[in-house]
Image (cartoon, rainbow, N blue to C red):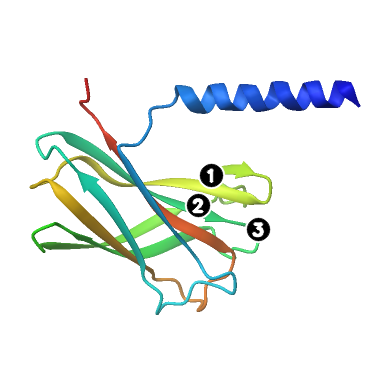
Amino acid sequence: MMHTRSITLALTMGMITLVSCAPAPLATDAWAVDPDGWSKGDTAELVFEIEQADRLHNVYISLRHNEAYPFNNAFFFVQLISPGGQTLTDTLSCPLALEDGRWLGRSWGKWIDHKIGYKSQVEFPEPGDYKLKIVHAMRRNPLPGVASIGVDVFEMNAN
């Protein structure tokens, strides 16, 4: 029994070390999906703050789902709203699995986590709170197997 605890502790410490070495996002937010499924009428509303508009940023959408998710891809309608109210609307196509069915994301127990590139090397026009509104554009409604959707913003040229 003691040997199992030692292995568990060593694995936990190893994971903490690996995670702590990765750069931390400048901003992050997540929205929990209804366990009964993500309805097309439910909009994920995420908020992140940009303090320095003169910096370049990478923006990722994070998606967590389980094996009940029935597709190898996902489509989203995304609105990015600036503090001044300007809106940029995109349709995002996201491959989630290979042709043979293997998931592209990272598996954590029963969950599969995907980090989907949304904006790369983007300079935000003004500092303040930005809103990201996301709805799914899939043919099944409600969409099963999705646990959460989120946003992670990384500053590229931080000193």
Does residue 89 appear left or right of residue 35 in this picture?
left
Q: Residue tagged by mark 2?
A: 96
Mark 1–mark 3 CB contact (< 8 Å): no
- The amino acid sitting under disc 1 is Gly
At 45% across and 61% down in the image, what residue appears?
Answer: 74
Query: Badge 3: few (under 14), some or many (20 or more) residues near its Cα, within 10 Å?
Result: few
The CA span between labels 1 and 3 is 12 Å
How many labels, in total? 3
- Identified at 12% across, 45% down, the residue is 127
Q: Are marks 2 and 1 in contact (CB under 8 Å)?
A: yes
Task: Mark 2 or mark 1: name the one nearer the start of the chain.
Answer: 2
Q: Are marks 3 and 2 in contact (CB under 8 Å)?
A: no
Q: Is residue 29 left or right of residue 50?
A: right
Query: Residue at label 1?
Result: 105
The mark that comes first in sequence, 3 or 2, is: 3
| Amino acid type, mark 2 | Leu
Disc 3: which residue: 67
Point out residue 56 in the picture as x, y percentages from the top left corner.
Answer: 17, 35
Image quarter in which the N terminus is found: top right
